[in-house]
Image: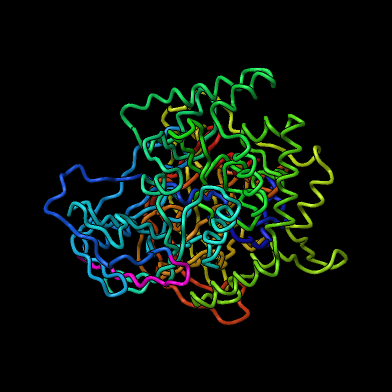
Amino acid sequence: MNKSHPIFLPVLKTNGTFKSKTILCFLFLSLFALTGCNSSTSSTETPAGSGENIGGDGDPFKRDRLLNINITLSEADYRQLKAEGRTLASTSRECPEQFEYTEFDATVTIDGDVIEKVKVRKKGYLGSLSPTRPSIKLDFNDILKDQSYQHRERMTLNNNRQDPSNARQCLTYDHFRKAGLPAPRCNFAKVTVNGEDLGIFTHIEPIKKPFLNRVFDNKDGNLYEAQLADFGLHLNNRFEKKTNETENDRNDLRLIAEAFQLPDEEFIDLIKSYIDIDEFIKFWAMETLVGHWDSATGNGNNFYIYRSSSDNLFHFIPWGTDASFTGRHLFKPDSGPLYRNFRLASRLYNIEQYRNQYRETLEQYLQDEWDEDQFIESLNQIASFTGTPQENLVSITEFVKGRGAPEDDGYKPSQKVLLTNALENMPDVGKEYLIPDVAPDCSSPVNSDLIVNASIQSDADSGTFQFTLPSGHLVNASITLAAFNVDSAVISEQNNSNPPVVSVLLIGADTNDNYKPYVLQVFIEKPQFANGGFEFHGFASTVLLFNVDDSKPLGVSTLALGDSGEMNLVNVTRTADGSANPYAFDLTIRGKVEFETGENNATNLVNP
């Protein structure tokens, strides 16, 4: 997650008067970062023929190697690949529908080596989804048995959508490995598809059996991927089985969940027989050190657990680290910098012996692992190697070194200062936010048609957005009426993603309910911000509806999320310098929004 910048959001009072309130323009993209989470689609057909290893014995993860990857598939297949993806509402349901990406046949050239009969598909759960610059998975031996590239059967190519620095993932995994913790290898690739230069991607070692064999010297244990998951009688079902899918009955997870019901002494005796606790504390401290808020201990997200057959213990593996080096979970205020938004971390923190072990481990990391100058040097080396602009590194640099002095306006303490202060004030530091261990609500969500007709011009903003509340009330939010008293359209470019996103924030007064205010936030990926139509897609092209609510930290509360639909832009022009908005355009939307009330969906992330 990159830093979000505040804007002035004018809001209407429910009595029809007006005021202005500074809030954050919806905190966007990586705040729902579920990148790294994906749904696998594997061929059930028997591979034909016999393949070979292509490219010799080189190391595809050598750090100073920039892979040059060219992918060729039919234009129709490429259009479909880019278009596939979940919508915002579909990912927030407590019981999401199964989603599988389509696999396509392709020819891939890597550093001049041609590999034919390769399966290619899109990857990503929500935050990394892009309709113009997709993350990609390659499978070399799906069609031709035993075909590989430099002895690797698969490649995972992340588009760095939430990390314009291109550095967060590799630097994070470097820190984990340096501390002796299991973590994937990582380097960089320049990716081209059908002649279209997609830029720099991060090449990540997949968490599959070859990784398990390399790290644990075995591959037959139970591997799970966590997507907003935790240990619990109900929550255990959120761990996705990645090996032994048929024979694994999740009994190993059930035993852990039951252990949490015991008093501390019995809990510790039992949990040590299921989880490598010393290693977990190192893992927890490392997530803290690198400010990986969208993590196991920071968010119950983006990690794997593997029960190694060598010791019959679970080990934690980091994943989806493109929000590292940010630290603060904006929708779980005051939960950092010492994360414990995970049951195991919370329980251990409340036992003095293990809280002290966590403290001592973190202090050791700060002393031995956290060299600010060396970190900045590594960051600049990656930027030089990948051609990343210096302005894309600012948020990481400020995380590491801080900004200004305490007496300065805009002062930001460094991560070392934040952690040192927090350690001095243990145990009374921060808050914890645990996912409730309750049965999921799988009832059908309530939705509504959304109709938007808006004209955003340099001299006036006009139009309406309409939807029906669960109560049956038809909201007719007039942008035109709101414009008499406030700036009812705020357009900005969000450059904390790659590609950037154009944010269209509309304010309307409900003519059917005493001019009650509503806010509609529209996101459009910048390459699509041109005359034409496109469908809702992940967080790149979507809508969110908000109630104005002064009691909330941001002055609004989420009402509904974009489910499906199409946006159309016409008359798009750049406005003159000095104009209130950078663009003038006409926007229509015909779609559906979804109202949700679940305990752990995106709505609650916006309503901490």
Give the percent coordinates (x, y) of residue 27.
Answer: 60, 54
Identity of the residue drawn at 58% across and 33% down: 435
Note whether 341 is above or below 184 in the view shown.
Answer: above
**Coloration of the structure image:** rainbow
> Looking at the image, which residue sits at the far left?
49
In this rendered view, identify the residue nearer to me: 22 or 169: 169
- The reply to whether residue 433 is in sight is yes
Which residue is located at x 58 percent, y 21 percent? Answer: 259
Q: For residue 513, what is the image quadrant? A: top right
Whether residue 176 is situated above or below residue 298 in the rendered picture: below
Q: Point out the image quarter for the N terminus.
A: bottom right
Q: Quadrant of residue 356?
A: top right
Q: Is residue 478 visible?
A: no
Stretch in magenta: 62-74
Q: Nearer the viewer, residue 433 or 220?
A: 220
Q: Identify the residue at horizontal 74%, vertical 56% (top origin).
A: 367
Pick the residue in front: 394 or 450.
Answer: 394
Q: Residue furthest right?
A: 407
Q: Is residue 69 magenta?
A: yes
Give the image location of residue 173, x and y in percent: 54, 56
- As drawn, 156 above or below 577: above
At x 55%, y 32%, the residue is: 275
Please, is residue 300 above or below residue 370 in the view? above
Q: Is residue 307 left or right of residue 48?
A: right
User: Left or right of 173: which side holds 363?
Assistant: right
Residue 512 image position (x, y, % from top left): 55, 43
Q: Is residue 150 magenta?
A: no
On screen, residue 209 versus residue 267, left or right, reads: left
Question: Percent from the top left, x then y, of residue 460?
Answer: 57, 69
Q: Quadrant of the C terminus?
A: top right
